[in-house]
Image (cartoon, grey):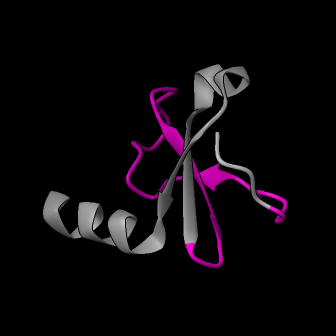
Amino acid sequence: MPETSHTLHFRKSSYSGGQTQDCIEVADVPGLSAVRDTKRREDGYLAFPSSEWSALLRSAI
């Protein structure tokens, strides 16, 4: 996991299904987006530069 000097505050992704437990959480800090599996938080997170995360979301729509 990349080091960040910011505290990551994760929230459930708006792209995750309503009441399902199969979802991801995201956290945003300046220049970075972090993603983790809600059910496996202890495994850590993946971090992406904000520009790459935005490109992924645009291509998924």
Against 54, residue 46 (above or below) is above
Image-based side of 1 in relation to 9, left or right: left
Write the residue at 39% across / 42% down. Answer: 17
Image quarter for residue 32?
bottom right
Res 28 quadrant in image: bottom right
Above or below, comparing residue 44 to residue 18 in the picture:
above
Residue 38 in the image: x percent, y percent? Answer: 60, 31
**Residue visible at 68% across and 27% down?**
41
Dominant secondary structure of the residues highlighted in magenta in the image? loop
23 with respect to 45 (left or right): left
In the figure, is residue 17 to the left or right of 55? right
Q: Position of residue 11 (x, y in %)?
A: 65, 54
Task: Using the image as rendered, state which of residue 23 and residue 33 is in the foreground.
Answer: 33
From the image, which quarter does the C terminus lie in? bottom left
Magenta residue span = 5-31
The relative height of residue 46 versus residue 15 in the rendered view (above or below) is above
Residue 14, above or below 45:
below
> Where's residue 8, x and y in %?
77, 57
